Amino acid sequence: MVNIDAQDFLLRGWALYYRGVSASVRQEALQAFERALELDPGSIDGRIGIGAVLTDDLVLSFSNSREQDIARADQALSEALERDLNRSMAHFAMGVLRRVQNRLSDSKIELETAIALDRNNARAFQQLGLTLMWLGQPETAIPKIEKAIRLNPYDPNIVSYYWALGSSNLVSGRIDDAASLLEKARAANPRLFFVHLWLAAPLALREELDEAKNSLAQSLKLRPEVSSLARWRAEYPWYSNAKFVALAEPTLYAGLRRAGFPEE
């Protein structure tokens, strides 16, 4: 009889975590980390894995119990960091979670700490870029995301990198670059609603209205709950940060309105 220990489940969990994103794969990864923690209740890596998966699910809108998953991720990551403050992935996941909680300054600190602990943590560079963008600093964000791509150009989730870079270019006013990068993101993974939603904006701003409307329709097909700017901001409150809104109004939001995305 094969003896499967906690380490086996940790290895399985991380292998699944780094695969191309899908709800089913994330669920398998979470179950593997949960089993590792059952077998070894003191496992730091089990806690980090649980926190990382739950946080990703919140960002990707895979979560079916948002407040419960926020609380659970916060507990798992806080417990991991209480045991060892020098885990780059723990700070990375906490940085993303703090953004989910609309604590953007805390998110920036955690992601910068993750990078200080591991200069090759490409996902931390990418997520730091996103947090900087929502803080209203896309010009500072762009080099961070470009570095993430250089560090890990073959990441199975490269869609997130191209989306982040395209988004930062869009709110910086580089409409053509944004459209090209967001199209790359869509080609890398067409199953994420927010890629289609963001892409609709530069297409509309370039007067490619049929393509913009098709992109918007695909977003609504994938996530019908996000059917207006108001609902989008309610679900993702960091989109309402004043400095970000000042940049998004003439770019992202203007393009979406032109594509037919309603205000309410």
Image (cartoon, rainbow, N blue to C red):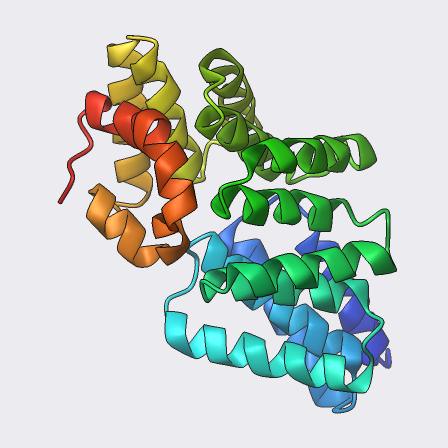
Q: Residue at x 75, y 63 (%)?
A: 89
- Is residue 6 toward the left or the right of residue 59 in the image? right
Q: Quadrant of residue 118?
A: bottom right
Task: Give the residue furthest to the top.
Answer: 207
| x then y, percent, for residue 237 | 36, 57
Q: Is residue 1 above or below residue 228?
A: below
Q: Is residue 28 above or below residue 175?
A: below
Q: Check the picture and name the quadrant holding the C terminus.
A: top left
- Horizontal side of 159 relative to 89 (left or right) equals left
Look at the image and tell me whether residue 204 can be seen. yes
- Residue at horizontal 16 percent and vertical 40 percent from the top: 263
Image coordinates of residue 8 in percent, x first then y, are 82, 71
Q: How many marks?
A: 0
The N terminus, quarter of image:
bottom right
* Above or below, comparing residue 81 to residue 194 in the picture: below
Residue 49 horizontal/vertical position (percent): 69, 69
**Left or right of 127, for residue 223:** left
261 displayed left or right of 13: left
Query: Residue 32: in sight, yes or no?
Result: no
Residue 209 quadrant: top left
| Residue 133 coordinates in the image, percent (x, y) | 53, 41
| Near-viewer residue (43 or 126) | 126
Identify which residue is drawn at 56% across, 77% down. Answer: 74
The relative height of residue 136 versus residue 25 in the rendered view (above or below) is above
